[in-house]
């Protein structure tokens, strides 16, 4: 049976789109039960509509507190039957109410090689300002402390003095759209094991994807991703 998941997003939704596309191609074995969004004009809503996926928008500004908003979000996600909550560009802090309801079942993607440049919403520009030579993206389990949970997969990309935010983020996004669905697929296949901070992915009889030029992904991507 396909893994029932819900995607929680605030903005453009390109990561959500990558999962929709791979699900429709039969590569990603999930059933996207709900796309939940906290911003009225977010493009991700149009993507959900276009794909015929159930969606729900709750403007967080209409709620008196973070707790009140998270309670409504938790209820919607529970009702959807999702067993994995996929944060894809969700730009709000989470309460313990929400995380306790989905213990060890919430994952996130962040546009840096965590723990570098975690905890903020400007990871790309911050990395450029620091002058790093490698940047990238990380998929991790979510814990109370922002961007801190056990890491499932990371991709590294080069970072040049000539880069600006757009060029670096474009490079990172290409890899986000590959490593995030791959991490979800490993979870769907029951191959992800967490021991403390250490995450392992059980080997399976799969061909590996052809490695991209100028990037390093670990664990390696499998065919289709
Ligand atoms: C992605 O780059 C993701 O890594 C980042 O937001 C973007 C969402 O893009 N997430 C964070 O910064 C979380 N702290 P998308 O809406 O096109 O998927």
Image: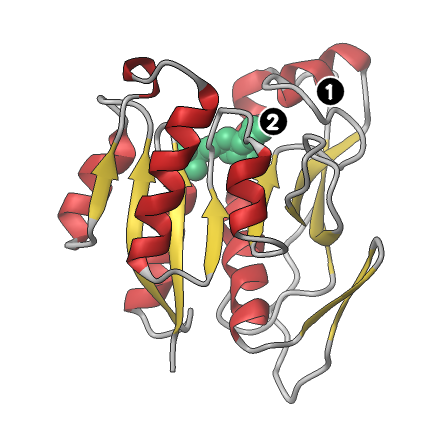
Q: Give the colour scheme shown.
A: secondary structure
Mark carried by residue 168: 2
| Horizontal side of residue 213 vs 116, given as left or right | left
Residue 171 in sight from this viewpoint: no
Q: Which residue is drawn at 57% across and 68% down?
A: 187
Quadrant placement of the N terminus: bottom left
The vertical placement of 160 against 48, above or below, is above
Label 2 CB-ligand 1 distance < 8 A: no
Rendered image quadrant of residue 153: bottom right
The vertical placement of 173 against 1, above or below, is above
Judged by depth in the image, the label closer to the viewer, 1 or 2, is 1
- Mark 1 and 2 residues: CB-CB less than 8 Å, in contact? yes
Rendered image quadrant of residue 52: bottom left
Residue 110: give x, y in percent of width and height.
62, 36
Q: Which residue is drawn at 70% across and 15% down?
A: 126
The vertical placement of 222 against 48, above or below, is below
- Helix, strand, or loop for circle 1? helix
Mark 2 closeness class: few <14, some 14–19, many ≥20 residues within 10 Å: many
Rendered image quadrant of residue 204: bottom right
| Horizontal side of residue 177 vs 152, given as left or right | left
Choose between 124 and 48: the one closer to the eye: 48
Mark 1 closeness class: few <14, some 14–19, many ≥20 residues within 10 Å: many
Q: Furthest residue to the top?
A: 129
Measure the alpha-carbon separation of dots 1 and 2.
Answer: 10 Å
User: Mark 1 = which residue?
Assistant: 127
Choose between 100 and 30: the one closer to the eye: 100
Residue 28: give x, y in percent of width and height.
42, 69
Choose between 167 and 57: the one closer to the eye: 57
């Amino acid at each position: 049976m396909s893994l029932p998941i819900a995607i929680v997003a605030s903005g453009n939704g390109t990561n959500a789109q990558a999962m929709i596309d791979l699900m429709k191609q039969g590569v990603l074995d999930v059933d996207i039960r709900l796309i939940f969004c906290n911003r009225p004009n977010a493009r991700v809503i149009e993507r959900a509509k276009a794909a015929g996926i159930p969606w729900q928008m709750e403007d967080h500004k209409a709620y008196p507190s973070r707790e009140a908003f998270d309670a409504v979000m938790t209820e919607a996600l529970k009702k959807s039957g999702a067993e994995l909550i996929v944060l894809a560009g969700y730009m709000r802090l989470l309460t313990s109410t929400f995380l306790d309801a989905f213990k060890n079942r919430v994952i996130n993607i962040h546009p840096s090689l965590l723990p570098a440049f975690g905890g903020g919403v400007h990871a790309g520009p911050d990395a450029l300002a620091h002058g790093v030579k490698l940047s990238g993206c990380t998929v991790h389990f979510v814990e109370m402390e922002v961007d801190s949970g056990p890491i499932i997969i990371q991709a590294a990309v080069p970072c040049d003095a000539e880069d600006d935010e757009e060029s670096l983020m474009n490079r990172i996004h290409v890899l986000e759209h590959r490593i995030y669905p791959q991490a979800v697929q490993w979870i769907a296949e029951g191959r992800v094991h967490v021991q403390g901070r250490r995450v392992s992915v059980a080997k399976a009889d799969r061909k590996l994807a052809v490695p991209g030029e100028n990037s390093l992904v670990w664990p390696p991507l499998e065919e289709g991703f």
